[in-house]
């Protein structure tokens, strides 16, 4: 049993956009198909190359294919 308030927080948290320029591993792993190692690669790419200028740029990270991008693009931002 999940208290109703926690249910809504969890649902909102899942559907809110994740800023890939500031997200940490805990936030990134909420994205479909993104595990801890992939989230570390995203963060490393960001540290080495500066902020993502567009959400499409995430495909430059090793392991982020066009298919994976299609799965997550609605849930990410570069705000």
Image (cartoon, rainbow, N blue to C red):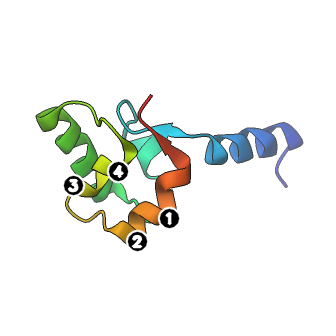
Q: Secondary structure at mark 2?
A: helix
Q: Which quarter of the figure has residue 43?
A: top left
Q: Are marks 3 and 1 in contact (CB under 8 Å)?
A: no
Q: Secondary structure at mark 3?
A: helix
Residue depicted at 34% across the width and 55% down the height: 36
- Provide the residue designation for mark 3: 60
- Provide the residue designation for mark 2: 67
> Along the horizontal axis of the image, is 34 left or right of 13?
left
Q: Nearer the viewer, residue 60 or 34?
A: 60
Q: Secondary structure at mark 4?
A: helix
Residue 75 at x, y percent in the picture? 54, 48
Residue depicted at 29% across the width and 37% down the height: 52
Q: Which mark is residue 71?
A: 1
What is the spatial separation of the Cα atoms under label 4 and label 1, in whole angstroms? 12 Å
What is the spatial separation of the Cα atoms under label 3 and label 4, in whole angstroms? 8 Å
What is the spatial separation of the Cα atoms under label 3 and label 2, in whole angstroms? 13 Å
What is the spatial separation of the Cα atoms under label 4 and label 2, in whole angstroms? 12 Å
- Residue 30 makes an appearance in the image: no
What is the spatial separation of the Cα atoms under label 1 and label 2, in whole angstroms? 6 Å
Q: Are marks 1 and 2 in contact (CB under 8 Å)?
A: yes
- Mark 4 and mark 2 lie on one chain; the one further toward the N terminus is 4
Q: Which mark is residue 56?
A: 4
Give the quadrant of the C terminus.
top left
Q: Residues within 10 Å of mark 4 (few under 14, many from 20)?
A: some
> Along the horizontal axis of the image, is 38 left or right of 33?
left
Q: Residues within 10 Å of mark 1 (few under 14, many from 20)?
A: few
- Mark 3 and mark 1 lie on one chain; the one further toward the N terminus is 3
Q: Which quarter of the figure has residue 65?
A: bottom left
Q: Secondary structure at mark 1?
A: helix
- Mark 3 and mark 2 lie on one chain; the one further toward the N terminus is 3
């Amino acid at each position: 049993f999940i208290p109703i308030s926690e249910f809504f927080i969890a649902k909102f948290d899942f559907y809110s956009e994740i800023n890939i320029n500031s997200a940490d591993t805990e936030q990134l792993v909420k994205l479909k198909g993104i595990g801890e190692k992939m989230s570390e690669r995203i963060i490393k790419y960001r540290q080495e190359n500066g902020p993502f200028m567009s959400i499409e740029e995430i495909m430059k990270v090793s392991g982020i294919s066009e298919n994976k991008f299609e799965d997550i693009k609605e849930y990410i931002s570069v705000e």
